[in-house]
Image (spheres, helix red, strand yellow):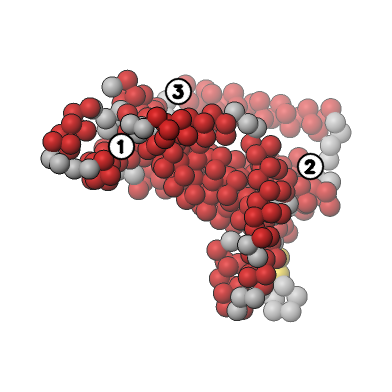
């Protein structure tokens, strides 16, 4: 029952009691004022101490630009990087949910072998720096498995319509293998955290749920499918939502393998404009905007009673 209390506390502390929005208090205003003063101090120190000349006028052109031939506004590097980050996060979160749910269920199995496999996966992945995992999986999956499967050749032979759809859902065909490697890597990494969330959610249920479903003659699979997992996932929805937000932020790691997401595009722009502070402040605000909007969206679609489960 301790796990159940942990999930209650987690849901309330993150989203507010019962899913309601907390009112702004005097303490909130004081902390916001302190944060604002600190930012002004940093701005002053950068300007005066480093003799840095701010130039925000170079930033808007990297959001949209007008195509010379058609005269239409076309997304530029920052918008394309933002879309790539979003697609990378969605695909990797789907894989993480599948892998994490499977490993989490194995962690509650009666069979020792399944529990050992689950614990080995979680402990190994969570105790290796994610950057190391990125390099290992990228060079192994990208250069060995995907090449042996002929993925690049298969993508190049697709029809133009399928290639456009592929670009819309992921990245252009010439960068598809690297994108798949990044998605799998992030999915496996995030899955190790979801596995513990799922395992904790299952173990938080009262033992009587298992006994009652067993007395009805249900098999282990039927118990999980019809009785245990629906209740467990209802309890862990806030934690899963938080993990999805973390996946958006963790996606910046794959910039080291030249995935053209938001962080990678920021480094490219900085190298060409030398506008270090303007670029990274813009990147920071874009990440905040993306995660904050998803937080609001997930808060809307998750039933309020899930927070007090």
Q: Nearer the viewer, residue 35 or 299?
A: 299
Kindly indicate whether the residue at mark 2 contacts the one at mark 1 (C-beta within 8 angstroms): no
Q: What residue is disc 2 on? A: 276
Measure the alpha-carbon separation of dots 1 and 3: 37 Å
Q: Is residue 114 left or right of residue 130?
A: left
Disc 1 to disc 2, how far (Cα)?
A: 46 Å
Which residue position holds label 1?
232
- Whether tag 1 and tag 3 are in contact, CB under 8 A, the answer is no
- Under circle 2, the secondary element is helix
Image position, residue 33 (x, y; %)? 57, 26
Q: Is 132 situated left or right of 96 in this image? A: right
Nearer to me, 83 or 281: 83
Question: What is the quadrant of residue 150 in the picture?
Answer: bottom right
Q: Is residue 129 left or right of residue 301?
A: right
Looking at the image, can residue 44 be seen? yes
How many residues crowd mark 2 within 10 Å: few (<14), some (14–19), many (20+)? Answer: some
The label nearer to you, 1 versus 3, is 1
Residue 132, compared with residue 86, is above or below; it is: above
Quadrant placement of the N terminus? top left
Tell which residue pokes out farthest to the left in this image: 216
Position in image of residue 17 (x %, y %): 32, 29
Q: 10 Å neighbourhood of mark 3: few (<14), some, or many (≥20)?
A: few
Residue 281 x/y as whole percent = 69, 41
The quarter of the rendered structure image containing the C terminus is: top left
Kindly identify which residue carries mark 3.
Answer: 26
């Amino acid at each position: 029952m301790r796990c159940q209390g942990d999930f209650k506390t987690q849901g309330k502390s993150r989203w507010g009691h019962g899913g309601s929005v907390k009112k702004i208090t005097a303490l909130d205003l004081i902390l916001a004022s302190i944060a604002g003063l600190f930012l002004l101090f940093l701005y002053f120190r950068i300007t005066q101490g480093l003799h840095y000349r701010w130039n925000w006028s170079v930033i808007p052109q990297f959001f949209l630009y007008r195509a010379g031939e058609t005269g239409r506004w076309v997304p530029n590097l920052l918008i394309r990087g933002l879309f790539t980050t979003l697609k990378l996060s969605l695909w990797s979160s789907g894989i993480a949910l599948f892998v994490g749910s499977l490993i989490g269920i194995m962690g509650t199995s009666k069979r020792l072998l399944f529990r050992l496999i689950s614990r080995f996966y979680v402990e190994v992945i969570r105790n290796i720096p994610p950057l190391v995992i990125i390099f290992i999986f990228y060079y192994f999956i990208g250069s060995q498995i995907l090449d042996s499967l002929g993925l690049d050749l298969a993508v190049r032979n697709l029809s133009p319509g399928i290639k456009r759809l592929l670009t819309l859902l992921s990245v252009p065909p010439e960068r598809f293998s690297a994108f798949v490697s990044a998605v799998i890597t992030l999915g496996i990494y995030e899955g190790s955290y979801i596995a513990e969330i799922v395992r904790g959610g299952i173990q938080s249920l009262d033992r009587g749920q298992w006994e009652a479903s067993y007395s009805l003659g249900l098999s282990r699979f039927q118990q999980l499918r019809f009785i245990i997992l629906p209740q467990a996932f209802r309890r862990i929805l806030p934690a899963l939502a938080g993990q999805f937000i973390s996946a958006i932020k963790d996606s910046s790691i794959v910039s080291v393998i030249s995935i053209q997401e938001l962080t990678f595009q920021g480094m490219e722009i900085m190298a060409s404009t030398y506008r270090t502070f303007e670029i990274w402040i813009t990147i920071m605000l874009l990440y905040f905007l993306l995660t904050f909007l998803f937080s609001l969206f997930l808060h809307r679609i998750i039933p309020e009673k899930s927070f007090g489960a």
